[in-house]
Image (cartoon, rainbow, N blue to C red):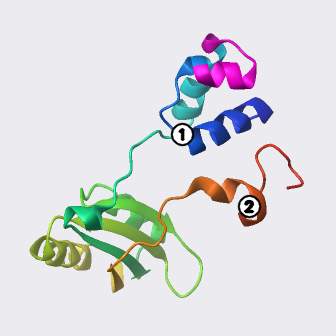
Amino acid sequence: MIDDLDRKLIELLARDGRRTFAALADDLGVSQSTVRTRLAKLEEDDVIMIVALCNALLLGHQVVRLLLRVRNLTPLAVADGLVGISQINHVALVAGSHDLYLEATCRDQPQLIDLLDEIRRHPGVAAIQPIIVTSLAKDYSWGGLRGTAGQSISDPDG
């Protein structure tokens, strides 16, 4: 369970994931040791993961979002089998007309075709609806944790 200090720490890192322990500690009014311990626990509990994100399109890669329908197996069983495919970087169970949502990045179109074929052959996959990304207007913003897009981290009424 996370508390207000964890929420404030997450908010600061969402703004700049490269901040030092010292800078975070100063802003939070706690010791660097506290920041280090809290971050380690948040990462260990899979609450956060600190990563660098790139715009794969600007690197010349193929970016695809996939909606999958599942048959004969549970969505969780199919998802568990797909997470090991290296081009897939996001797997989520969803509600609605599809069972799974995937995001993938491929170096080129031939690799994308191979990926789609691999997913089609995967047990339990009944249908794939690929969505080829041609341009990114916004991607991976954690701003949804604040303000009108989601619950405020610092103000629960927010």
Q: Residue at x 22, y 61 (%)?
A: 59
Neighbor class of circle 2 (other Cα within 10 Å; few <14, some 14-19, many 20+) is: few
Q: Please give the range of residues in magenta.
A: 23-33
CA gap, disc 2 and disc 1:
19 Å
Task: Give the farthest residue toward the left.
Answer: 110
- At mark 1, the secondary structure is loop
- Most foreground residue, 2 or 126: 2
Picture layout, residue 67 above or below residue 105: below
> Where does the image place residue 117, in percent across and percent down from the top left?
18, 78
Amino acid, disc 2: Gly
Check residue 27 for magenta coloring: yes
- Most foreground residue, 135 or 93: 135
The reply, left or right, for residue 82 in relation to residue 106 is right
Q: Residue at x 24, y 80 (%)?
A: 120
> Where does the image place residue 2, in percent across and percent down from the top left?
73, 35
Q: Which residue is mark 2?
A: 150
Picture layout, residue 118 above or below residue 87: below
- Most foreground residue, 120 or 71: 120
Q: Residue at x 76, y 59 (%)?
A: 147
Q: Which residue is mark 1?
A: 16
Per the rendering, the mark at residue 99 is none
